[in-house]
Image: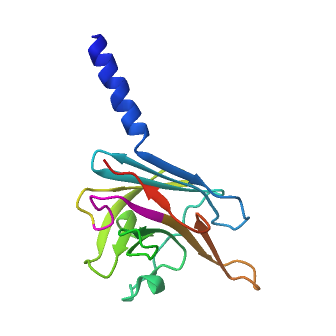
Amino acid sequence: MVLGAVSLAVALAAQAAMAAEITDPNEGGPFDIRSVHATRVGQVLEVSVSTYQTWRSVLVASSPPPLVLGELYKNRIQIIFDTNSDGVPDYVGVIVRTKHRGLRMIVEGPHSNIQAIKATRPDHYTVLVKLPDGSVANPTHKYQLAAKSVFFGGPPDHPKVVDRAPDSGWIAIPHA
């Protein structure tokens, strides 16, 4: 029994070491990022992005979809993946609400077909994506990511509001 408790404590400590989180200051935008949290659970990477304000329908995709994601999804939350840790984005996951399939993260990059990964909304401020093992945005080595929100519809002098978390640099993603 004691051995089981010690094994559980070691496993929990190891899992705690497999998480990374950053908070971002409130810059006052309508889609301003509060925090980004990444946790590795086995080979699955769980990434959550929380905002300071609630959001609901601002992520709806336009219809019919054009060929370029940036044209399709005006308002968006993005998770930017630097899978070789060179400081340059390799893949971008765009989180949107599709008309028939709910929240999805559409991942695109230079060396992949577009992948659609289910996203959920654990509360009114947060989106959560679980990247499975084998996803191009979840490699088997250490890498880094950042989050970005883009909102159109701000004041006339700033109709496009962009926030990045962290403001510069990256979040190091732990790997077993």
Residue 105 picture quarter: bottom left
Q: Nearer the viewer, residue 103 or 4?
A: 4
Give the percent coordinates (x, y) of residue 44: 30, 51
Give the position of the N terminus as an image quadrant.
top left
Is the residue 94 above or below the residue 39 in the image? below
Is the residue 141 above or below the residue 61 in the image? above
Give the percent coordinates (x, y) of residue 166: 58, 63
Residue found farthest to the front: 86
Characterize the magenta stretch by its predominant secondary structure. loop
Q: Nearer the viewer, residue 144 or 96?
A: 144
Q: Nearer the viewer, residue 171 or 34?
A: 171
**Residue 139 forms part of the magenta stretch:** yes
Is the residue 132 above or below the residue 61 in the image? above
Tally of numbered discs: 0
> Looking at the image, which residue is at 37% across and 24% down?
9
Residue 93 picture quarter: bottom left
- Residue 96 shows in this picture: no
In the image, the segment drawn in magenta is 136-145
Q: Relative to 70, is 109 on the left or the right?
A: left
